[in-house]
Amino acid sequence: MPNQLSDHYDMPPEDYWGRTPAWTPEYFATEIAAAKRLLPFADGMTALDIGAGQGLAMQSLIHAGFDVWGIEPTETFYQYASPKMKPGRLMHAAVETAEFDAESFDFITFGAVLEHLYSPSLALGRAMGWLKPGGIIQAEVPNARWLIAKLVNGYFRLRGTNYVTHISPMHPPFHLYEFTDRSFRRFEVAERVWSVCEIPYFPRLLHSPLRWLMDRTRTGMQLTVYLRK
């Protein structure tokens, strides 16, 4: 683990993500629709984006009628996103050190964040304290049961190596953890979604059968959970 977050993430956003896409209303729309259904939603409900990155999810939440705040610990990402927000709405802070009043938010999102944190459990516990009773936390994380990783690991073993293609603590995207639905068993899980996402390493001819299999066995790349307080 690095001594500080900047050891991993102190780089221009376009270098980390490979691009800096323009915001569109479709960004984060599926997750917002799920949150609105589970809350249920009323205009002006409060939302917090933890790990705001380029600010795209914050923009989508604002567009969807939420009253939105965000926190971003990395200086370069914060400087990129903050001009797009109202003054004071995006804080340069980490989830471990940010301060909000208890029960301030109806909806909190961790979009591709928990896998980067030293203590995901601590982060979720702090966020639960900021969430109103009945509120929803959305967390998108890498699925530890991802079929493609298992197949690639099998290839490495056949080659006589001890390599694995799960976490990547020393190179982008710097994942320290992977998760299953049991990772969230101490919370009330309102909904779970497994997504296949991209299928790397395999020829396109095999994508259709692999997608079919992952859809039915919940072994896609990504797990999204919606936790209720």
Image (cartoon, rainbow, N blue to C red):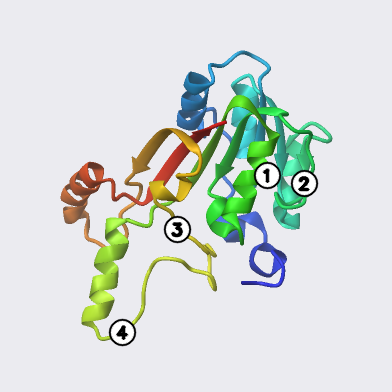
Pointer 1 or 3: first along the chain: 1
Q: Position of residue 65 (x, y in %)?
A: 63, 19
Q: Residue 178 carries which label?
A: 3
Q: Is mark 2 on a helix, strand or loop?
A: loop
Farthest residue, direction front: 186
* Residue on which the image places disc 4: 161
Of residues 156 and 130, which is closer to you in this image? Answer: 130
Which amino acid type corresponds to the residue marked 4 in the rendered image?
Thr
Disc 2 crowd, CA 10 A, few/some/many (<14, 14-19, 20+)? some
In front: label 4 or label 3: 3
Which amino acid type corresponds to the residue marked 1 in the rendered image?
Arg
Mark 1 vs 2: CB contact within 8 A: yes
Mark 2 vs 3: CB contact within 8 A: no
Q: Quadrant of residue 191 in the image? A: top left
Q: Where is residue 192 in the image (x, y as percent from the top left)?
A: 39, 37
Disc 3 crowd, CA 10 A, few/some/many (<14, 14-19, 20+)? some
Residue drawn at x 69%, y 64% as measured from the top left: 5
Pointer 1 or 2: first along the chain: 2
Residue drawn at x 39%, y 51% as measured from the top left: 180
Q: What element carries label 3?
A: loop
Q: Position of residue 172 (x, y in %)?
A: 53, 66
Quarter of the image where the C terminus is located? top right
Mark 4 vs 2: CB contact within 8 A: no
Of residues 57 and 225, which is closer to you in this image? Answer: 225
* Residue on which the image places disc 1: 126
In front: label 4 or label 1: 1
Pointer 4 or 3: first along the chain: 4
Which amino acid type corresponds to the residue marked 3 in the rendered image?
Glu
| Rendered position, 185 above or below 43 | below
Disc 4 crowd, CA 10 A, few/some/many (<14, 14-19, 20+)? few
Q: Residue 98 carries which label?
A: 2
